[in-house]
Amino acid sequence: MHDIPASVRQKILPHPSLNPFSLVRFPAPIPLPESSYEAHQYLSTHVPTNDKIRDIFLLTPPPSALVHELRKLLNSDPSICSVVLPHDEVDPDERYPLWVVQFWVELIPFYVAQKKWCTAVASIERRQRHRTKLSGGSSPSVDATYVGVVPAA
């Protein structure tokens, strides 16, 4: 396993004690919905060329299924030294440290939670718009309405 360095972890992932509402609002980079590249095309035997935290945080991760494949490959092949992003139109040859895959793995629960949250918010807002239309009034946004309802972690 290629762990995220502790000094980096505290800068790119939210603190575990954040309340659930803050976690679903964490600005995680959104993964590609699909990729025409295979897992082995994301891996390199050359040393990393970029370990800048900001650059890594801003990368568009591959789809979640591909991230899991990458993790398996990393654990089975000690010759792999870095990660590349063939889908990156700006710099597909830039090489990143191996822990970037673990970062992407740890982001997956955020994507899932955020997707569920957005679906719930959209549903509630549709109901509110319908009720508002019927009553001729207005209502606060769902986020503003439910901030106080979400229990702290």
Image (cartoon, helix red, strand yellow):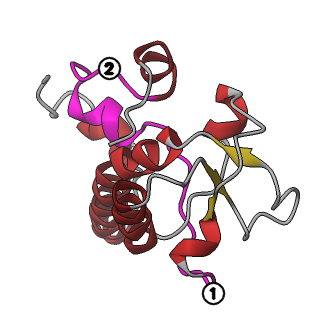
Q: Residue at x 28, y 51 (%)?
A: 109
- Which residue position holds label 1? 36
Q: Secondary structure at mark 1?
A: loop
Q: Residue at x 50, y 44 (%)?
A: 28
Q: Position of residue 117 (x, y in %)?
A: 30, 55
In percent of width and height, residue 57 lies at 61, 38
| Horizontal side of residue 87 vs 3, given as left or right | right
Residue drawn where x is 44% and y is 42% of the image = 103
Which amino acid type corresponds to the residue marked 1 in the rendered image? Ser
Question: Which sits in the foreground, 14 or 23?
Answer: 14
As for residue 39 lying within the magenta part, the answer is no
Mark 2 or mark 1, which has the lower sequence index?
2
**Main secondary-structure element of the magenta-colored stretch:** loop
Asked if residue 14 is among those painted magenta in the image, a careful observer would answer yes
Measure the alpha-carbon separation of dots 2 and 1.
Answer: 34 Å
Label 2: which secondary element: loop
